[in-house]
Image (cartoon, rainbow, N blue to C red):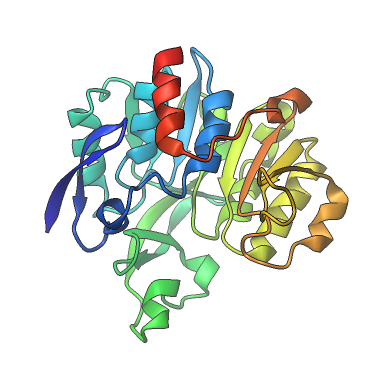
Amino acid sequence: MPLNIDVPEVGKMRVRMRRNRSYWLRSPLTHEWYPLSALSHFVRPGDTVWDVGANVGLYSLILTRIFKARRVVAFEPMAQNRPLLSHNITVGGVADKVHIVPCALGNVDEETDFQTDDIQSASGTLNVVTGGQACVAREKIGLPPITERVQCRSVDSLVAADELPKPNVMKIDVEGAERILLDGASEFLRLHDARLVIETHGAEVSRACLEFLFDHGFFVAACVPENVDRRRHKRLDRAAIRTISGQYDAHFIVASKIDSDLDFPIEHDASKLLAESKNAR
């Protein structure tokens, strides 16, 4: 059942009442303060941003309407999400700035299985992440997997083919496939200073992503628990990898090859952050 909502500072969006209930049970910006703090600093005039895991378009709207990205490439493999994504981009008045790509990003170029989450978040992940099992939300309540076939591409192959504008910034939310995506972007990230905002899904994948980033010459910070840093923003070095044991020890990772890029202010009220960004830009 579709539901029209008004997201603070962002505007009108259409979501599904059950699958996207996080949009109306609470503000959809509640848990987005850290990645939005990073992106408000990372995105600069003229930038191209890849929104990897665009879902129904919240970040694509923020990146263009508020942070003023010149263009956004929105990757969304789930067929059931793309009509809402397209609707929200059109209603938001940024269809000329957002290019929707109907594929997943990974480390291969092939059609592959994708596990759909129709219970919790209208998202999904590559079948290789779950080992053919159902997504976490379906598995928790004993439901079998829902699998769809999707096209998968690697960042390196897309860049080599010159099919899309190269990203200055990548926002990555791929439900456990974060390291797989980075492996498929190895050559591009070796040669370019793309600024990265990565939501990680578990301690193991957080450690794997950090290892990759340090190996490729990135400076790294992360959203950490309050008992580690009161601001919840902390620079990390390679030694930090072995300290990560919980899902939220490095829940969001930010990375750049320019050290000073990681010196950005943290605003814990996302609505206030967006309002201030609107006025500043």
Specify the quadrant that holds the C terminus.
top left
Left or right of residue 129, residue 150 in this image: left
Left or right of residue 88, residue 250 in this image: right
Q: Residue 137's x, y, as percent?
A: 39, 73
Judge whether residue 257 can be spotted in this image: yes
Q: Residue at x 20, y 29 (%)?
A: 90
Q: Residue at x 50, y 18 (%)?
A: 47
3 and 116: which one is in front? 3
Q: Quadrant of residue 113?
A: bottom left
Q: Residue 186's x, y, as percent?
A: 68, 41
Extreme-right residue of the structure: 239
Q: Quadrant of residue 114?
A: bottom left
Q: Residue 23's x, y, as percent?
A: 29, 51
Looking at the image, residue 147 lies above or below residue 254:
below
279 and 202: which one is in front? 279
Left or right of residue 53, residue 16 in this image: left
Specify the quadrant that holds the N terminus.
bottom left
Q: Residue at x 39, y 23 (%)?
A: 66
Looking at the image, residue 197 lies above or below residue 61:
below
Q: How many marks?
A: 0
Q: Residue at x 68, y 59 (%)?
A: 249
Judge whether residue 67 can be spotted in this image: no
Q: Residue 93's x, y, as percent?
A: 22, 23
Extreme-left residue of the structure: 1
